[in-house]
C-alpha cells in the first residue's frame, strides 16, 4: 500500500523529513490500527508494554507492514506481543554483562582495545528483539553533554583503546551538530584509529541519511556505519538510496543481522537479504544468535539452526553474501563464532595417504587434504619488520 493512502495528511516534503518521521511515530494501538489489523496477541502485547516498554514506529517503517498478516517480519520487529511478558530459560536484564563494565555512564569497556560509546536511549523504532532493552525501554539515559564529555575523557585517558563503536539507543536520533561534536572529540584522540557508528536509520528512517550527514561523516574517516537489516522486505528503494549515499561519500556500510525465529530463520530469506545488500554495496558482516535479553525468548533460535543455515548459504551463494555466525556469550565473555564442521572420519576402505584430514564438500563428496611436509609456521622477517616500525605498529596494544 502506498504511504499516501495510509497517511494522506502528510505532504511529500514532510514524508521525506526525518524529524517529521520521528515526531509522527506510531505508539499506541489506536495509531497502529491505522496501518494494520491488529491481532489479539498484538493488542495484548501493546497493553503489556504500557508503562513498561517503549513502542515507536516511524510512519515510513509502518508503511512496510503487511496490514493483514501478523507474521509480517516488520510487524514482528516493531509491534509487541504477549510473549514479551513470558520468561524463557537464561533470560537476563543485562545479557552481555555490560553494566559491570561501564566505568562511566557513556562507556562500556568489555574488550581491551575497543569500547562501546552510548549516546542515549532513544531510537526511531524500538526493536522487540533489542539486547539493550534495559536502556532503550527505561527512558533513563537521554543525551547529556556532560556525560558525553566524561566519556570522551575516559577514552582519551586509555591509550589502549583504538576502536570506538558509537551506539545507544540510535545515535542518528541526534542532530548533525551534536553527532559531529561527539565524533570530532573522539577523532581528535591520537590513539583512536577506527570509529564505528551503529544505527538502524537506513532501515527504519532512511530519510535521516541526508547529503549533509554523509558529508559530515566522511570528515571522520576511517569511520564505518554498521546497520541492521533483518529481512529483504526492508530492502526498499529508500533504504538503498541511504546506503549508497553513504558509500558514495566514502563511508563504508556493513550489516549485522539478528537471527529471529519465524522471521528470518530460513536460508532462502537470508540469501535473498544478503544478496540484495551486496547490490546496495553493503557488506553482510555478522549473523547474530539472539542474545538472552529478557522478553525475547520467543524470537530466539536453537544454535544448530544457525549453523545449518550457514552451511546452506555456503552451498548456495558467494562467500561475499555469507556473514559470520556470532554468539555473544552471557556475562560479558565476548563474541565467539560458529561454523559447520566439514571434517569427517576417513571413509571405510580409504587408502592410507599419510598425515592429513578428510573433508566433506558442500555437495557431500569426500576429499582428502594432505598435511604439508614442512610444519614450522614461524615468519622469519616478522621481528625485523616490527623492530623497524616500532611498537606502535606491532598490534601489541591488544595483548
Image (cartoon, helix red, strand yellow):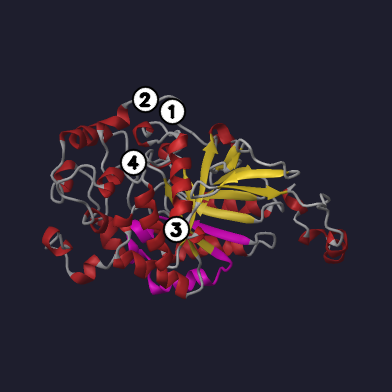
Q: What is the C-alpha distance between the residues marked 1 and 4?
A: 15 Å
Q: Earlier in the sequence, mark 3 or mark 4?
A: 4
Q: Earlier in the sequence, mark 1 or mark 3?
A: 1
Please state the horizontal and vertical placement of residue 251, each as a whole percent of the image.
Answer: 50, 69
| Helix, strand or loop status at disc 3 | loop
Q: Is residue 356 left or right of residue 320?
A: right
The N terminus is located in which quarter? bottom left
Do residues under tags 2 and 1 come within 8 Å of each other at their CB atoms? yes
Q: Which residue is mark 1?
A: 91
| Helix, strand or loop status at disc 4 | loop
Q: What is the C-alpha distance between the residues marked 4 and 2?
A: 15 Å
Residue 32 position (above or below residue 43)? below
Q: What is the C-alpha distance between the residues marked 3 and 2?
A: 37 Å
**Which label is found at residue 128?**
4
Q: Which residue is mark 3?
A: 317
Q: Which residue is mark 2?
A: 87
Mark closer to the observer (3, 4) = 3
Count residues near mark 4 (Cα–Cα under 10 Å), then give few for <14, some for 14-19, many for 20+.
many
Residue 251 position (above or below residue 383)? below
| Helix, strand or loop status at disc 1 | loop
Please state the horizontal and vertical placement of residue 200, each as a whole percent of the image.
Answer: 39, 55
Q: Which residue occupies the foreground of this view, 370 or 36?
A: 370
Mark closer to the observer (1, 3) = 3
Residue 246, quarter of the rendered image: bottom left
Amino acid at each position: 500500500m502506498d504511504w499516501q493512502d495510509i497517511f494522506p495528511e502528510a505532504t511529500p516534503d514532510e514524508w521525506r523529513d526525518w524529524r517529521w518521521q520521528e515526531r509522527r511515530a506510531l505508539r499506541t494501538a489506536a495509531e497502529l490500527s491505522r496501518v494494520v489489523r491488529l491481532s489479539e496477541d498484538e493488542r495484548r502485547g501493546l497493553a503489556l508494554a504500557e508503562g513498561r516498554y517503549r513502542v515507536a514506529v516511524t510512519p515510513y517503517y509502518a508503511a512496510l507492514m503487511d496490514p493483514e498478516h501478523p507474521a509480517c517480519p516488520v510487524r514482528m520487529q516493531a509491534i509487541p506481543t504477549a510473549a514479551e511478558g513470558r520468561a524463557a530459560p537464561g533470560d537476563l536484564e543485562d545479557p552481555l554483562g555490560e553494566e559491570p563494565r561501564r566505568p562511566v555512564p557513556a562507556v562500556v569497556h568489555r574488550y581491551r582495545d575497543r569500547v562501546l560509546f552510548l549516546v542515549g536511549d532513544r531510537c526511531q523504532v524500538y526493536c522487540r528483539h533489542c539486547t539493550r532493552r534495559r536502556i532503550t525501554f527505561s527512558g533513563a539515559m537521554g543525551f547529556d553533554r556532560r556525560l558525553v564529555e566524561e566519556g570522551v575523557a575516559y577514552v582519551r585517558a586509555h591509550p589502549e583503546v583504538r576502536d570506538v563503536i558509537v551506539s545507544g539507543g540510535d545515535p542518528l536520533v541526534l542532530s548533525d551538530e551534536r553527532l559531529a561534536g561527539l565524533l570530532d572529540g573522539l577523532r581528535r584522540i591520537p590513539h583512536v584509529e577506527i570509529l564505528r557508528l551503529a544505527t538502524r536509520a537506513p532501515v527504519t528512517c532512511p530519510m535521516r541519511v541526508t547529503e549533509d550527514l554523509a558529508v559530515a561523516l566522511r570528515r571522520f574517516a576511517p569511520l564505518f556505519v554498521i546497520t541492521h537489516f533483518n529481512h529483504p522486505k526492508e530492502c526498499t528503494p529508500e533504504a538503498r538510496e541511504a546506503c549508497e549515499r553513504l558509500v558514495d561519500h566514502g563511508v563504508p556500510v556493513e550489516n549485522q543481522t539478528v537471527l529471529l525465529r519465524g522471521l528470518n530463520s530460513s536460508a532462502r530469506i537470508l540469501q535473498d537479504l544478503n544478496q540484495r545488500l551486496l547490490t546496495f554495496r553493503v557488506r553482510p558482516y555478522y549473523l547474530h544468535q539472539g542474545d538472552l535479553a529478557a522478553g525475547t525468548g520467543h524470537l530466539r533460535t536453537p544454535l544448530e539452526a544457525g549453523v545449518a543455515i550457514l552451511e546452506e548459504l555456503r552451498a548456495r551463494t558467494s562467500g561475499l553474501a555469507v556473514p559470520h555466525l556470532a554468539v555473544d556469550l552471557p556475562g560479558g565473555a565476548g563474541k565467539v563464532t560458529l561454523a559447520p564442521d566439514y571434517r569427517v572420519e576417513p571413509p571405510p576402505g580409504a587408502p592410507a595417504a599419510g598425515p592429513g584430514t578428510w573433508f566433506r564438500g558442500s555437495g557431500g563428496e569426500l576429499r582428502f587434504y594432505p598435511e604439508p611436509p614442512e610444519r614450522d609456521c614461524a615468519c622469519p622477517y616478522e621481528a625485523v619488520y616490527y623492530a623497524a616500525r616500532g611498537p606502535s605498529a606491532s598490534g601489541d596494544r591488544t595483548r
